[in-house]
């Protein structure tokens, strides 16, 4: 029987919702308190088991996060004590954790947010192999299962599991600390974090091989990470990266036809672009540019924002875009940036201007096995009436392309040329 | 926690380096060593004689075999080491990044396995 005035017992749905909202934050704090990933994960699991058992009787506590943290901590220390019957070292560890974590357990909201930032920086530590950074971040920060990560990256699950196990072993054995880097280290370390997030996004946005053009879950996870990072550390590049992802994502509905074929930017139905995402992206770009400390992500976002602002392809401000690419090239010179710059110049000054830049890149021996440079060259040759060269470049691109929709796009262009010429 | 910082650099650079430059580098090493002694990171450290002085020893089927030269022929050679006491890997990386040879060669940072 229920007493009058008592909070109605929570159903499974309520606990599930709390799990989704709080489990990663609780985990991040438990890792700090317990100093060990595996111990913390076990504690998180035990804390939710306890919640499922108790909350239906007692109601949801007023601060479920704090309840879960202290229950998890208690369960972990209790578990170590039980194991201490067989291993004396466990007793010392339990005592140490009890005193240390009691001092550290001051559940201010700010501290807990710091824990998430600590977790991100630890998972993306440059001393871990790049593959492991991605897997560990998705596992620990986003809470994705090993199977899900393996599926998203087209890898066997044991490979992903092994990367995660090895990374955790290195964190423990080499003592990678659970901390936000100090000011002088921050720019380099932040760069590693942004790279991981952008890699996750790109993997979702444009799968490097296979049929699926968009693996949407990875995009939303990356955007979620981007938002978290902007909330925790609002600097020009974190805002730039979030803006860049939002602006790309805003076009996801119009990038592919119902048959799964790729639609290029200029041919996309702009009425299907996600306006709220574009508006949010543009606002972030403006905030990033206002800091006057822009980096490569903010610049790429500014370019994407110009596309987002154009009401139709013809209205695109190619002058401004070409200008931004040259700033980007000065800041982060790479042949891929040079290629993008060449395309922007072609749109501003005509195909020949772009072609000569592309030929310069190829003559240097750069990007020779990158299908997009040949596709871009083919397109510009086609526009300037050099059909034989256009065909040759489409054939080159087709020989290098790995992804189904891109392949079909290139085949269709080549077929058009064959029919018209 | 203790870490071993293994200093790898191109040995040939030491032979071709002008005297003034070598003097300066020695000075940098002295200053670095004093610095980490004062900060409490220093446990030990030594430069090594160049690789032509190295011998590699193996015992196979109870037989000792000794060969001339280092264990592996690589572009950069082990030229010295520091044993340091550091709070964690970030602290160790900070120390390693200030070793003068980090600017030209590479420093491998390895945690010591503590035996109980």
Image (tube, rainbow, N blue to C red):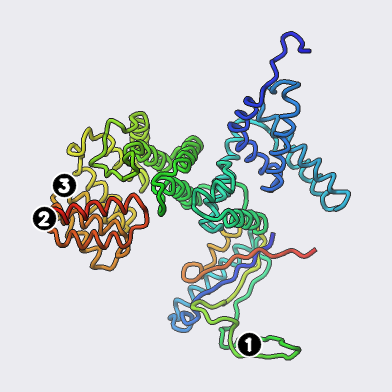
In the rendered image, which residue does mark 1 sit on?
A: B55
In the rendered image, which residue does mark 3 sit on?
A: A348
Percent across and percent down for residue A407 are: 31, 54
Question: In the picture provided, is A313 more to the left or to the right than A148?
Answer: left
Q: Spatial distance from mark 1 to mark 3, Cα to Cα?
A: 66 Å
Percent across and percent down for residue A62 are: 67, 22
Which element type, helix, strand or loop, lies under badge 1?
strand
Location of residue A333 with respect to B15 vertically, above or below: above
Question: In the picture provided, is A250 more to the left or to the right than A161?
Answer: left
Q: Nearer the viewer, mark 3 or mark 2?
A: 2
Chain letter belonging to callout 3: A
Question: In the picture provided, is A387 more to the left or to the right than A266?
Answer: left
Q: Is disc 3 on the same chain as disc 1?
A: no
Q: Nearer the viewer, mark 2 or mark 1?
A: 2
Extreme right residue here? A85
The first of marks 3 and 2 along the sequence is 3
Q: Classify the position of the N terminus of chain A by image quarter.
A: top right
Identify which residue, A35 or B42, lies in the foreground. A35
Chain letter belonging to callout 1: B
> Which quadrant holds residue A160?
bottom right
Q: Nearer the viewer, mark 1 or mark 3?
A: 3
Identify which residue, A262 or A218, lies in the foreground. A262
Q: Spatial distance from mark 2 to mark 1, Cα to Cα?
A: 69 Å
Q: Is disc 1 on the same chain as disc 2?
A: no
């Amino acid at each position: 029987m229920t007493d009058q005035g008592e909070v109605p017992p929570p159903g499974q749905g309520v606990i599930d919702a709390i799990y989704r909202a709080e489990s990663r934050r609780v985990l991040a704090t438990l890792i700090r308190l317990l100093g060990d990933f595996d111990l913390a994960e076990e504690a998180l699991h035990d804390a939710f088991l306890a919640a499922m058992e108790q909350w239906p009787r007692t109601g949801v506590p007023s601060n479920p996060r704090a309840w879960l943290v202290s229950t998890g901590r208690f369960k972990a220390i209790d578990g170590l004590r039980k194991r201490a019957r067989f291993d004396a070292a466990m007793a010392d560890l339990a005592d140490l954790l009890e005193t240390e974590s009691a001092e550290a357990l001051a559940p201010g909201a700010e501290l807990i947010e710091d824990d998430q930032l600590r977790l991100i920086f630890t998972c993306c530590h440059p001393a871990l192999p790049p593959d492991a950074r991605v897997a560990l971040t998705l596992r620990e920060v986003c809470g994705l299962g090993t199977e899900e990560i393996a599926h998203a990256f087209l890898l066997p699950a044991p490979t992903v599991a092994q990367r995660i196990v090895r990374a955790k072993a290195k964190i423990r054995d080499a003592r990678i600390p659970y901390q936000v880097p100090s000011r002088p280290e921050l720019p380099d370390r932040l760069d590693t974090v942004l790279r991981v997030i952008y890699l996750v996004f790109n993997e979702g946005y444009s799968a490097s091989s296979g049929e699926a053009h968009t693996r949407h879950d990875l995009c939303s996870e990356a955007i979620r990470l981007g938002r978290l990072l902007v909330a925790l550390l609002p600097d020009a590049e974190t805002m730039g990266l979030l803006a860049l992802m939002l602006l790309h994502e805003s076009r996801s509905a119009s990038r592919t036809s119902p048959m799964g074929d790729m639609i290029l930017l200029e041919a996309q139905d702009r009425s299907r672009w996600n306006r709220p995402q574009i508006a949010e992206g543009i606002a972030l770009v403006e905030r990033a540019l206002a800091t006057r400390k822009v980096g490569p992500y903010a610049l790429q976002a500014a370019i994407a924002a110009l596309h987002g602002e154009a009401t139709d392809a013809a209205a695109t401000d190619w002058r401004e875009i070409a200008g931004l690419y040259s700033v980007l090239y000065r800041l982060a010179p790479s042949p891929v940036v040079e290629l993008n710059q060449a395309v922007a110049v072609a749109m501003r000054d005509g195909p020949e201007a772009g072609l000569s830049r592309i030929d310069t890149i190829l003559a240097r021996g750069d990007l020779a096995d990158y299908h997009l440079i040949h596709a871009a060259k083919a397109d510009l040759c086609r526009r300037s009436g050099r059909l034989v060269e256009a065909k040759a470049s489409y054939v080159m691109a087709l020989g290098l392309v790995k992804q189904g929709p891109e392949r079909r796009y290139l085949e269709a262009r080549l077929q058009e040329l064959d029919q018209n010429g | 926690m203790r870490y071993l910082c293994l200093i790898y650099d191109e040995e040939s650079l030491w032979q071709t380096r002008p005297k003034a430059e070598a003097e300066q580098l020695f000075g940098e090493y002295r200053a670095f060593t004093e610095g980490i002694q004062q900060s409490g990171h220093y446990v030990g450290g030594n430069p090594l004689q160049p690789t032509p002085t190295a011998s590699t020893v193996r015992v196979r089927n109870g037989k000792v075999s000794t060969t001339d030269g280092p264990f592996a022929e690589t572009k950069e050679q082990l030229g010295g080491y520091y044993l340091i006491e550091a709070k964690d890997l970030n602290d160790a990386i900070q120390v390693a990044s200030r070793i003068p040879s980090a600017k030209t060669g590479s420093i491998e940072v390895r945690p010591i396995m503590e035996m109980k």
